[in-house]
Every structure is written in C-alpha cells, then in structure tokens.
Image (cartoon, helix red, strand yellow):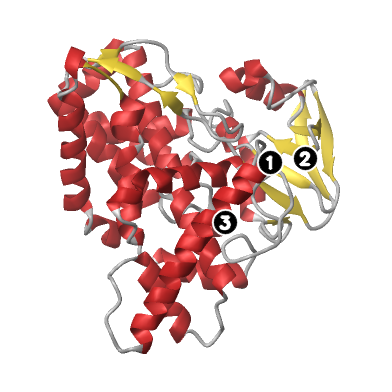
Amino acid sequence: MTYDPFAPDTLADPFPAYARLREECPVHRYDARGMQFSTLSRHGDVLAALKDVATFSSRQGQGPFRSEPIALFDDPPSHTFFRRLVTTSFTPRAVQRRESMIESLVDELVSAMLDEPGRTADLHDALAMPLPTIVIARMLGVPEELRTTFKRWSDAQVAGMGAGDVEEQRRTRREMQAYFIDEIARRRALAADGEEMPDDLVSGLVSAAMQEERPISEAELLSLLTQLLVGGNETTTSLLTNVVWRLLERPERWQAVVDDPRLIEVAVEESLRHDPPVLGLFRATTCPVDIGAEIGAGRETGRLDQDQKVMLLWASANRDPEVWDDPDEFRLDRDLNALRARHLSFGFGIHACPGAPLSRLEARLALAALVRRAPDLRLAGPATRIEPFFLWGRRSLPVRW
C-alpha cells in the first residue's frame, strides 16, 4: 500500500492510514524526502520492539535521521547511567511535592484566561502551552522572563527531528546551548568557591557530574538538559489540548466530566490512548529481523534489514482492535487500570518517558480547574494541529464560556 506520513490528508488525520497499515502492510517501507525508514503499526509488534532494546537500538537517535549516541539517546549501560541521573527528579513522590506549585500556577493561568474580554480565548496560548513551559522552566532554574525564548528553543529542537529550516534550527540550538553552558559554568564556579548552588535540575546534574567516578562531558550535560526541556513541555501541551478538544467535540462528554469529576483521570488516560502527543519514535535495527504479520487469510513475514531506521508507531498500536474494543472511539467508560497498563503513549521499558508522572499531574490539575471554574466551556471554532509529523496536538484551540 501507499503510505506517506507527510501527505496532507495523513497529517490532518493519521488514524485512517494507520488502520490500513495494520490490515494491509504492518511492516511498511518509506523512501522519500531524503528519508528511509520502516514503520511498525500493530500493538504486538510495537511492544515487542520496545522490549527488545538489543535489536531495536536507540544509539542512532529517536528521529528519522541518524545521530551520534549521547546520554539518554543511547543503549545500556550508558543509557542506564544517565537515566539514573534524571529519574530522581521525576518519581511520583518528587512530582507530588510540586503539586501545590502547579495547582497555584493553574489557577493563575485559568483566572487570566477567564478574564479575557469577549469570553473567548485560545486554550493553547492561555493554558496548555504556558503551564508545562513555566513548570519545567522553574525546575531548570530558567528565569520567568525567558519563557518565550525557552519555548522557541524547545520548538526548534522538535523541528530538528523532522524537517524545516536547518540553518535556523542550528542557530537556535547554538543560542540555547550557550545559555546552558553559561549556567553550568556558573554552578561549577559556585561549587568550587564552596557556595550553595540554586536548588534546580541544572544544579542537580552539575552536582551529580562532579560526584560520579565516570566523567560527564559538557556535551552530555547539554543533551540531558535539552531532553528535559523538550520532554517537559511539548508533550504535556499536546496532552492538554487533545483532551479538552475531544471532550468539547461532543458536549455530552464534557458534561459527563463536569457532572462527575472522578472521570478526569479516565479522560486523561483515554486521551493518551486515543490521541497520544507523540505518534511514534524511531529505533535502528542491530541485525536483520523477521516480523510476523497476519494478512488476509494467510500469514506473511515482513523483514527489516540490519541498520534500518524503524518508526515504532504507538499511536497505531493504541488503536489496535486486537487490544481495544471500539478503538477509534473516545470513551469515558474504559477501565482506568487497563488504560494505564496497555497504552504505549509514554513508551515502554527502559526508554519510557521519565516525565510521565509530571505530565499526568499537570493534565489532571488543569482539567480539574477548567471543569470547576468553566463548566460551560465549549469550542469556539476549528482546532489546528501542530506541525511536526511525529507529534499530535492542537496548535490552536479556540474556546468560549
């Protein structure tokens, strides 16, 4: 079959194409736009690949283009070493300590939105984008006045994984790296003088780098900080716009959550399953791989060559009818534990997103505030999607109340 992830129809709504992939070509090869990669679309195949990190390697990056292994973009044991440095800041207990700060920020942003003249706003600009951006900026010790710059840096990093103005991306990357290099140097100088460093993630990583027997290079620290920057805001912004979009798309869904706020957690997890902020990420095969796939009445095998880029399409896996009843329907009556256990929207295994607890908390608190303070919220116009082909979220979400 013909499948082009960059085709306008696919970008507008990729899920019909994913259904065809699962049925007709669960191991698909794409070769255009200077890219060559295969796509796995069935839940079983995607999950098996995520589990088999020896065969499906992250050493060439998680985008369609090949990159050098560094920090979290690597395989064990190097990946294990760097993941340990960051996970302590994102455990459920560590995230819970930030709940009051996040709740206060949510109320501040929602209040500002509800004060908008004309009782209309773009939910993306008013809440979904600033909330996670400010939270991760505070965690990294970035001043509030750099928030807009901070968001621009993050957008450029995401754009660099797909296509776009390469020179602009490089310029922006150098700008971001210069900022963090200065911050790393400042923290090291404070430590050398016996002074206390600020209590943030940058200081935590610098301190860990000074204590580890294995030297941590400046490039590795920059890679970790970049990953935290992007992962800390892009995906949560899309989660927030997606869940509100689907609830308001059918007013009875929104009303059900207004009537029973206990459904907020289900709504967040069902949004992650139905509309994952990351449609899929890439691995590279370390050896030839045969992928079994039932097609029609027979059984065929798709083959992946060695050193081949492979997109693990967990958005398609999340709607596999072999795993989910009524998979294309957004439903609030699904079992919460089953949702959490089966959807792959935060990845799986050793490369699962370390920021998942933080993202979930931000989404729950934001949705709870909207349900409580704007129960008559409704769509005020069509939503538009964000640009990167491997991400799925609303760039604009006009609402009224």
Q: Position of residue 213 (x, y in %)?
A: 52, 88
Q: Is residue 143 left or right of residue 238?
A: left
**Looking at the picture, which amino acid does disc 2 mark?**
Phe
| Disc 2 to disc 1: CB gap under 8 Å | yes
SS class, disc 1: strand
Which residue position is annotated with label 2?
37
Q: Is residue 384 left or right of residue 321?
A: left
Which residue position is annotated with label 3?
174
Image quarter for residue 354? bottom left
Q: Position of residue 48 (x, y in %)?
A: 65, 48
Q: Quadrant of the N terminus?
A: top right
Density class for disc 1 (Cα within 10 Å; few <14, some 14-19, many ≥20) is many
Q: CA distance from mark 2 to mark 3?
A: 28 Å
Q: Is residue 376 visible?
A: no
Q: Position of residue 290 (x, y in %)?
A: 82, 45
Which residue position is annotated with label 1?
311
**Looking at the picture, which amino acid does disc 1 mark?**
Met
Q: CA distance from mark 2 to mark 1?
A: 7 Å
Question: Which of the two discs, 2 and 3, sits closer to the camera?
Answer: 3
**Looking at the picture, which amino acid does disc 3 mark?**
Arg
Q: Is residue 115 visible?
A: yes
Q: CA distance from mark 1 to mark 3?
A: 28 Å
Above or below for 266 versus 154: above
Image quarter for residue 40? top right
Which is more toward the observer, 55 or 211?
211
Q: Quadrant of the C terminus?
A: top left
